[in-house]
Amino acid sequence: AQSVSQHNHHVILSEAASLELGCNYSYGGTVNLFWYVQYPGQHLQLLLKYFSGDPLVKGIKGFEAEFIKSKFSFNLRKPSVQWSDTAEYFCALVYSSASKIIFGSGTRLSIRP
Amino acid sequence: DGGITQSPKYLFRKEGQNVTLSCEQNLNHDAMYWYRQDPGQGLRLIYYSQIVNDFQKGDIAEGYSVSREKKESFPLTVTSAQKNPTAFYLCASSIGGQGSQPQHFGDGTRLSIL
């Protein structure tokens, strides 16, 4: 079955630490990939997306993600996190043959000030 | 400002009762979606609609029903057949229905059972 895996359920970091959140998917077809973020008390919003082209994509607030086709991965990174990055992060994808987005289970990120 | 409005923010349901969650968008988007968010399970798709008067079941449609009579509205009814309805419900929309466009989300409705 087509699926998205986020293995880190809860990540705790100190401010200025580097961040990498894992995202893997199960099927090797053509995919469009997304990272969404949900800040406390706010609605889900798009962080970044990959459709084609340069596999290293840059999003808002200093986040970036790299699509590695051979590893079926789309990990999210940030070189130096801030307390305001505390949120839940969702990886999502849509296969070109499908018409709906599949979401991962989410990773809760807590930043210690 | 354009966006998605979900109401109410909190909803309580008695056993055996149907309740309807409202979702309205003024983004002129064709596609609309309903998700259920449970802790540790991410977002699971309940129903989606790519065009007015048409909708498809998602991964967990049992116990739910929807209608799409107007482009801007996509209400979700949680029926008494849904055995575990306590959850956070999110409505979303996108420009196209192929899933390739980023989705815009509402603020959600939290449903609890009395």
Image: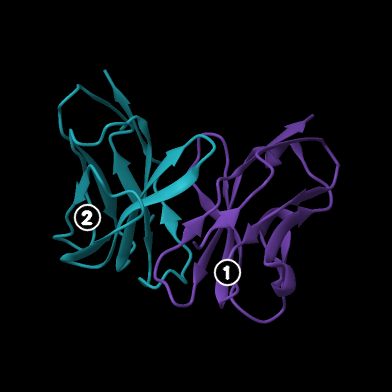
- Classify residue A18 as left or right of residue B82: right
Counting from the top left corner in percent of width and height, residue B13 is at: 22, 25
Count of numbered circles on the image: 2
Residue receiving disc 2? B73
For the N terminus of chain B, the image quarter is: bottom left
Q: Secondary structure at mark 1?
A: loop
Residue A62 sits in which quadrant? bottom right
Q: Tell me which chain appears cyan.
A: B
Asked whether residue A63 is in view, the answer is: no
Q: Residue at 23% x, 63% y: name it.
A: B55
The Cα atoms of the two marked residues, 1 and 2, are separated by: 34 Å
Q: Amino acid at mark 2?
A: Ser
- Colour representing chain A: purple
Q: Residue at 44% x, 41% y: name it.
A: B37
Q: Residue at 46% x, 47% y: name it.
A: B43
Q: Amino acid at mark 1?
A: Tyr
Label 2: chain letter: B
Q: Nearer the viewer, mark 1 or mark 2?
A: 1
List the single residue furthest toward the top. B114
Residue receiving disc 1? A27
Label 1: chain letter: A
Q: Secondary structure at mark 2?
A: loop
Counting from the top left corner in percent of width and height, residue A58 is at: 71, 66
